[in-house]
Image (cartoon, rainbow, N blue to C red):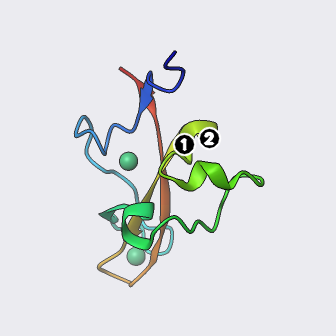
Amino acid sequence: MQPKSTLSCPVCNGFSPFAASCPTCGQPLVDNGRYMDLFGDYSPYRPIDDAKLTDGLIDARTHQCPHYATCRHCGYEGVQLIQEQKY
Ligand SMILES: [Zn+2]
Ligand SMILES: [Zn+2]
């Protein structure tokens, strides 16, 4: 029984480059890695009320992988959700 094994983040797995534009200035954002790897399991967008999902499997419900992104041009920083894909 492996219900979660079919989806994974293409950026974390190296299948796709991180690609997102700064919402403020439009320049490409820089990926700093998975949000939870950087800041522990705290999440500002914790899904509903299930804390069990914060052990690195927040995407179990949303199928999105949170990446912490920054902009070198204007200083913007925030979380970009990478849509997980089937492989
Ligand atoms: Zn990822
Ligand atoms: Zn910017």
The residue sitting at the left extreme is 14
Rendered position, 49 above or below 74: above
**The one of 7 and 85 positioned closer to us in this rendering:** 7
Q: Is the distance from the Cβ of mark 2 to the nearest ligand 1 atom less than 8 Å?
A: no
Position in image of residue 71 (x %, y %): 35, 75
The residue that appears at 49% across and 74% down in the rendered structure is 24
Up the image or down, 40 lies above or below 3; here it is below
**What residue is shown at x 51% (from left), y 64% (from top)?**
41
Report the amino acid beneath label 1.
Asp
Q: Is residue 19 left or right of residue 64?
A: left
| Residue under the image location 63 percent in, 50 percent down | 52
Give me the C-alpha separation between circle 2 and circle 1: 5 Å
Q: Which mark is residue 59?
A: 1
Tell me if label 2 and label 1 are in contact, CB under 8 Å: yes
At label 2, the amino acid type is Thr
| Front-lying residue, 64 or 25 | 64
Image x and y of residue 38, in percent = 37, 69
The residue at the far top in this view is 1
Please state, as top left, top right, bottom left or bottom right, where the C terminus lies in the image: top left
Q: Is residue 46 left or right of residue 63?
A: right
Q: Position of residue 86 (x, y in %)?
A: 42, 22
Among the 4 quarters of the image, the one containing residue 40: bottom left
Q: Which residue is mark 2?
A: 62
Give the class, few, some or many, for how many residues have Cα within 10 Å of label 1's Cα (few <14, many ≥20): many
Query: Is the residue indicated by label 1 positioned so its CB lies within 8 Å of ligand 1?
Result: no
Q: Quadrant of residue 10?
A: top left
Residue 34 in which image quadrant: bottom left
Q: Nearer the viewer, residue 80 or 34?
A: 34
Looking at the image, which residue is at 25% across and 45% down? 17
Q: Is residue 87 above or below residue 36?
A: above
Regarding mark 1 in the picture, which secondary structure is present there?
helix
